[in-house]
Each structure stands twice: as structure tokens, then as C-alpha cells.
Image (cartoon, grey):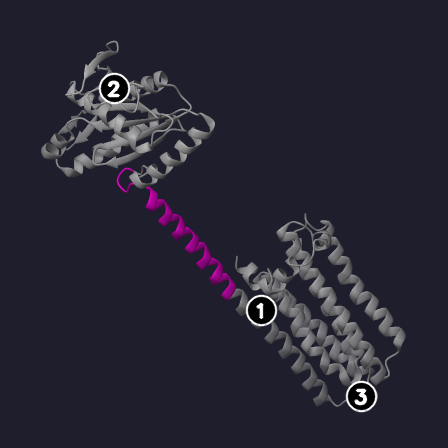
């Protein structure tokens, strides 16, 4: 992300080129970035070569030398650009070939310093520009290596240029040239390292920000106590699933789960034990249902389970297994363990009904389970939406009795 933001001013305009830019730079974003930077270096070296022709005429440098120098300088970077664009460098440790291109450009620039004559001082800004390319993805170790390579290379270039110059310059002049060259290399490297440190901090800040955002998103959809989805997020999911069910005909069932006599737990053992009991209950239910089923804490000791792609019979069997598992679950407290039971109401979503209506029917079934003695699963019948609240419900008790009609009281 940090690298992308730094290069945005270069890469984005290239992305806005006509369709042929995809053929020229590639379709993959990383490939476009690498190819763009390699092409930029090649273009700058081409301009540098044209500048060398001007210097050659002013300083008496043979044109044939500039021909060969330009061909090697531009040709080397152009070959690297082609290797990057065609993917030949993709398997290398440095797929962008930045380190290789920098060493090639530094070497060609050092040669230009040797033959530049009185205008060789103009080579130094180019030296710093080349080192600036180290900002883009080079490690601290690589930058120190490039600094050492440049210092040795340009020290040799200063000495060789002094040896070739007629009449030879004084020792003080050579020392001054050497000092300026080494200072330029050192300054360019330190600037790169400083920018890299800033980029590193920005990258870490971005990682921390993304982690914080992910945590905030998780907190926004999770119940803090049980770790289940919260009521607001499940409501959104239920509306989404209801629309899918309307389009595709997939079955959607909602179940209301409630821990029986949970207030007694809090009153007898305290709220801390009650909180642990809610956590154990949530873990037990989550472990008993399918991966695709969605369980959420609705409020207090009430939970809602959303089931899809199943039948009422299979959903009822699943809830019965959950009920039996909860009934056999030991809930610890300071003096030992206790057990709780669970009541559940199940309703199948009907075309044309809202999610709220389906939840209401499931809640009515749960009310029937509570009124009928608790510790049982009750299924709301697939009756018409106009059916009054005193409708009959099918119940399955802890004894596993056959479904029977039971009015709501």
C-alpha cells in the first residue's frame, strides 16, 4: 500500500492510457508497476544519451564513442524492461530487476564521468537520481551494498579521469572531485534510507490500521460475551437470506432458543456464573449445528438460529439433538456443577412474509414450549399468515413423544 501510494503519480497516468497500454505494460497490476518503472528508467537513459550528444559536440568527445555508449546504456535497460514485461524475470529474487538496472546505470554513468571532460560535474545529479530508484523496494542491506559499489566505482572514475586529462589536474582538484562524488553517493543513499524508514512506518501504520478496522468490524457484528453474532448483524443476514430464498426457492428456517429458568441461575449462583453458563451454552450449540447454520445471541438468555437448505423435519431433529446435548451439559460453579435445559421454537419462512413475521411465529412456538413444561422443541405449523395467535403448534418434549397439538396458553 505504501509503495502504491508513492508511485501513484507515475503509475496512475499510465493506467489511463488507451487499451493498447494493456498490451504494452501488461494486465496484472504488479506487472504494470514493474514494467512502468523499468520503462521510466529506459526513457530517462534515452534522454541522458541525447544530452551526451550535446556534450560530445561541446567537449570534443568522438561521436562514435557516444554511439557505443548510448547503445549499451539504453540497450541494457531496454533488455531489462523486456525481461520484466515478458515475465522472464518473474521467478527471480528481484522480479523487477531494479538492483541490476541500478548497477548498470551507475556503471554507464561512471563511464560518462570519465569522458565528460569539463562537463563531467553534470554527471553527479544523474548519480543521485539513479540512487533514488533504490527507494522502490530495495532493502537496507542492498542500499548499503549499492553505496559501497558506487563509492568504489566513482572513486576509480575520478582517478582515471584525472589520469586521462591533459594537462593533469592538481592533487587538490582531484581530492575535491573525489570528495564531492563520495558526498553525493552518501547523501543519495542516506536520503533513500530515510524515505525507506518513512515508508516502513507508513506500511506498519497501515497494517495496524487494517487490523484495527478488522477488529472494529468484528466487534460491530459480535456479541462480546459469547463471541456469537449479535442481533443487529443476524437481522441483516436474515433479510439477505430471505431475499435469496425468494429468488431461488431455498428453504429458510428460524429457531428461537431460550435457556429455561435462567434467572434462577443468576439469582442462585451470581451473574459471573451465569455469564460462564451462557458461554458454555453458546459453545455447545455452535458445536452441534452445521457449519452453514448461523447462530446469534438475541438478548439475555435468548438465541436465534438461522438454518438454510434443509427441511423442517431435519431442522427439528437437529434442534432435538441440541436440546439433549444442552440438558447433559455440566455448568460449573464454585460449589460444583449444575445443569440447565433449553426450549426452542422453530418456524419456516414463507414466501410473502417478512423476516419479522417468521421470527414472531418462532417466538410463538417458543412460548408454546415454555407453557407446555419447557425443555422441548415446538414447530410452528405452515399455516396462512392470517392465522390467529391461538393456533396449534407441534411439540416434541424431553420424553421424545410424538408430535401433538397443543394450544398456546
Q: Residue at x 30, y 33 (%)?
A: 356
Pinpoint residue 313: horizontal percent, then vertical percent.
35, 16
Pinpoint residue 66: horizontal percent, then vertical percent.
85, 74
**For the residues carrying marks 1 and 2, which lies nearer the camera in this image?**
2
Instruction: From the image, tell me which residue sits under label 1.
Output: 192
Instruction: From the image, tell me which residue sits under label 3.
Output: 168
Q: Secondary structure at mark 2?
A: strand
Decide if residue 98 is in sight here.
Answer: no
Q: Secondary structure at mark 3?
A: loop
Q: Secondary structure at mark 1?
A: helix
Kindly report the distance in space between the C-alpha atoms of the residues bearing marks 3 and 1. 35 Å
Instruction: From the image, tell me which residue sits under label 2.
Output: 378
Highlighted magenta segment, given as a residue range: 198-226
Q: Is residue 339 left or right of residue 237?
A: left
Residue at the left extreme, as displayed: 268
Query: Is residue 11 highlighted in magenta?
Result: no
Q: Residues within 10 Å of mark 1 (few under 14, many from 20)?
A: many
Q: Quadrant of the C terminus?
A: top left
Task: Tell me, yes or no, whether the two marked residues, 1 and 2, touch with CB atoms within 8 Å.
Answer: no
Q: Residues within 10 Å of mark 3 (few under 14, many from 20)?
A: few
Q: Earlier in the sequence, mark 3 or mark 1?
A: 3
Q: Residue at x 34, y 37 (%)?
A: 234
Please tell me whether residue 25 is drawn above or below residue 268 in the rendered image.
Answer: below
Foreground residue among 237 and 98: 237
Please tell me whether residue 200 is drawn above or below residue 360 in the rendered image.
Answer: below
Kindly report the distance in space between the C-alpha atoms of the residues bearing marks 1 and 2. 70 Å
Amino acid at each position: 500500500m505504501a509503495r502504491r501510494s508513492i508511485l501513484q503519480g507515475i503509475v496512475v497516468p499510465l493506467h489511463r492510457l488507451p487499451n493498447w497500454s494493456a498490451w504494452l505494460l501488461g494486465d496484472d497490476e504488479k506487472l504494470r508497476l514493474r514494467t512502468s518503472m523499468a520503462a521510466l528508467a529506459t526513457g530517462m537513459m534515452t534522454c541522458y544519451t541525447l544530452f551526451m550528444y550535446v556534450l560530445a559536440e561541446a567537449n570534443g568527445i568522438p561521436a562514435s564513442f557516444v554511439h557505443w555508449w548510448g547503445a549499451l546504456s539504453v540497450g541494457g535497460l531496454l533488455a531489462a524492461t523486456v525481461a520484466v514485461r515478458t515475465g522472464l524475470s518473474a521467478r527471480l529474487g528481484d522480479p523487477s530487476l531494479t538492483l541490476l538496472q541500478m548497477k548498470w546505470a551507475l556503471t554507464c554513468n561512471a563511464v560518462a564521468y570519465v569522458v565528460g571532460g569539463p562537463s563531467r560535474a553534470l554527471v553527479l545529479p544523474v548519480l543521485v537520481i539513479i540512487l533514488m530508484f533504490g527507494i522502490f523496494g530495495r532493502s537496507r542491506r542492498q542500499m548499503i551494498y549499492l553505496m559501497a559499489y558506487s563509492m568504489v566505482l566513482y572513486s576509480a572514475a575520478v582517478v582515471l579521469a584525472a589520469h586521462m586529462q591533459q594537462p593533469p589536474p592538481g592533487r587538490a582538484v582531484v581530492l575535491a572531485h573525489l570528495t564531492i562524488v563520495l558526498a553525493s553517493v552518501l547523501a543519495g543513499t542516506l536520503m533513500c534510507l530515510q524515505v525507506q524508514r518513512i515508508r516502513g512506518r507508513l506500511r506498519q501504520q497501515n497494517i495496524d490500521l487494517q487490523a484495527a478496522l478488522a477488529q472494529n468490524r468484528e466487534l460491530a457484528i459480535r456479541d462480546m460475551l459469547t463471541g456469537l453474532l449479535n442481533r443487529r448483524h443476524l437481522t441483516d443476514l436474515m433479510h439477505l437470506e430471505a431475499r435469496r430464498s425468494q429468488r431461488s426457492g431455498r428453504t429458510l428456517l428460524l429457531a428461537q432458543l431460550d435457556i429455561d429458568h435462567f434467572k434462577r441461575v443468576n439469582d442462585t449462583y451470581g451473574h459471573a456464573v451465569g455469564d460462564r453458563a451462557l458461554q458454555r451454552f453458546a459453545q455447545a450449540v455452535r458445536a452441534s449445528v452445521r457449519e452453514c447454520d448461523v447462530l446469534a445471541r438475541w438478548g439475555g438468555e435468548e438465541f436465534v438460529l438461522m438454518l438454510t437448505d434443509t427441511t423442517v423435519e431435519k431442522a427439528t431433529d437437529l434442534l432435538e439433538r441440541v436440546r439433549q446435548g444442552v440438558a447433559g451439559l455440566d455448568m460449573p460453579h464454585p460449589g460444583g456443577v449444575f445443569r440447565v435445559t433449553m426450549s426452542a421454537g422453530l418456524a419456516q419462512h414463507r414466501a410473502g412474509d417478512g423476516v419479522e413475521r417468521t421470527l414472531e411465529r418462532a417466538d410463538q412456538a417458543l412460548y408454546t414450549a415454555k407453557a407446555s413444561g419447557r425443555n422441548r422443541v415446538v414447530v410452528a405449523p405452515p399455516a396462512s399468515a392470517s392465522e390467529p395467535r391461538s393456533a396449534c403448534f407441534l411439540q416434541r418434549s424431553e420424553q421424545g413423544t410424538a408430535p401433538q397439538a397443543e394450544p398456546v396458553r
